[in-house]
Image (spheres, helix red, strand yellow):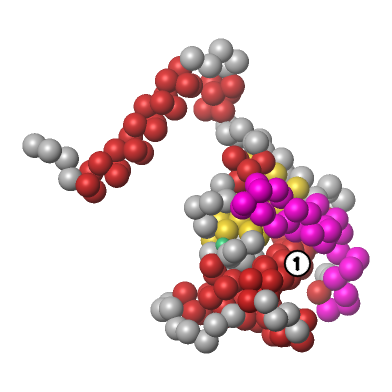
Amino acid sequence: MSKSDLEISFQKVLDGNKDWVDFVAHDTTGRFQQLAKGQSPEILWIGCADSRVPANEITGMKPGEVFVHRNIANMCVHSDMSMLSVLDYAVNVLKIKHIVVAGHYGCGGVAASLSRNQYGIIDNWLCHIKDVYRLHASEIDAIEDETEKVNRLIELNVVEQVFNLSTTSIVQNAWKDNRDLSIHGMVINIGTGQLIDLDTTFTNNEALGKVFAYK
Ligand SMILES: [Zn+2]
């Protein structure tokens, strides 16, 4: 019986895994046997679910080196239990040292948030990005070029998500315990592969202001 197009397209996954199994079998460093026992990454990556921005490939990090959470438009929403659970495990169990919030130019989620179109249930998620727009509306509205407008909101969205992470009790309690924990805001240029630092790094709660910084 000949395979359907659907089966053929999925076969890539199985074939790819065969190659990976072969690669692991020929590895002589012993690292996969070590990884099978546990992980101790130093980096938590919070990125967009977009298929073009895989954390490991972009940073050259190997399996075991980066703990990853991805969602539409790399959001850090205070009530998102999935993100909070990843953050808590990363900070308090894995004791990671760096968190990277990685946006990317051309992000469809951010572009959609700048329109008045309805896309379905995702509209409620995109509202968090519309809130970022509201904070920076005068700057965004002053940009005429549509691509530049979206890309600037992509940068500002990363800055706001870094701030959101910094305000969580999880991160602030780690700082209170004098833990070395840095939160970095970065944006990926998919066309060049470059990871650009937005220079919005937080290493303590001093810049959060009197309402957000816990005693
Ligand atoms: Zn995206």
Q: Ligand 1: does it lie within 8 Å of the C-beta at label 1? A: no
Residue 195 at x, y = what percent?
Answer: 71, 50
Residue 154 at x, y = what percent?
Answer: 67, 68
Around disc 1, counting alpha carbons within 10 Å, would you say few (fewer than 14), some (14 to 19), or many (20 or more)?
many
Residue 92 shows up from this direction: no
**Residue 48 vs residue 2: left or right?**
right
Q: Residue at x 64, y 71 (%)?
A: 147
Front-most of 82 and 74? 74
Q: Residue at x 86, y 64 (%)?
A: 205
**Residue 78 vs residue 25: left or right?**
right
Front-most of 56 and 208? 56
Local SS, label 1: helix
Q: Quadrant of the C terminus?
A: bottom right
Query: Picture quarter containing residue 161?
Result: bottom right
Query: Picture quarter containing residue 199?
Result: bottom right
Tell me: residue 212, above or below residue 142: above
Per the image, the residue denoted by label 1 is 159
Furthest residue to the front?
Answer: 145
Magenta segment includes 207:
yes
